[in-house]
Amino acid sequence: MGLNIKYRYALNEDDLPIDIESLFEKDRKDYICPGCGNILRAVFGKVKQKHFRHKKNEDCSSETYLHRMGKLLFEKYYREAMESGNPFLLGCEIQLKCKRCEHGPCNIDKSIEFYDLTLHFKSIEIEKKVGRFIPDLLWKSDSGEKIFIEIAVTHNSS
């Protein structure tokens, strides 16, 4: 798959993300653009690679499209990991410390530790309000712990 196609994903009739790479000629029908809500068509060209394109020339924001697809795909892959029993790993950089020096711990190197979030966070929701915040994605544990996730396309959240 090349990097030059603009619309790799669309929404199917159940409002779920669908990858153009999973479709065949028999799947030629109307899909929905997650960015603007208008109709996308699957294109199975002989020269260009498969992609979706708008049925009509629409004013669709790439940022909105990418932001929405980021949320939908993140949720999809997390739910699939939970249902299949596969891990969904989060890597966190940690500072390693030396405990042998007489003047105290020294920062000697960094390491990455991975945590399987499916073991602790059993719920994921898109744009669920928590107090005065509405994170793009919300992970919740059975004990009430929460992680807010923001998808940044061209600017960080304020």
Image: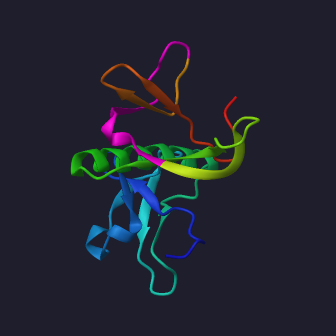
The image quadrant of residue 94 is: top right
> Is residue 71 covered in magenta?
no
**x then y, percent, for residue 30:** 36, 58
- Name the residue rendered at 73%, 37% in the picture: 102
**x then y, percent, for residue 142:** 30, 24
- Establish if 139 lies above or below 63: above
**x then y, percent, for residue 68:** 51, 44
- Name the residue rendered at 33%, 50% in the picture: 87
> Is residue 121 covered in magenta?
yes
Number of numbered tags placed on the structure image:
0
Q: Is residue 86 left or right of residue 43?
A: left
Whether residue 5 appears in this view of the structure is: yes
Residue furthest bottom in the image:
47
- Establish if 56 lies above or below 140: below
Q: Which residues are magenta?
A: 114-132
Q: In the depicted view, which residue is nearer to us: 113 or 151?
A: 113
Residue furthest right in the image:
103
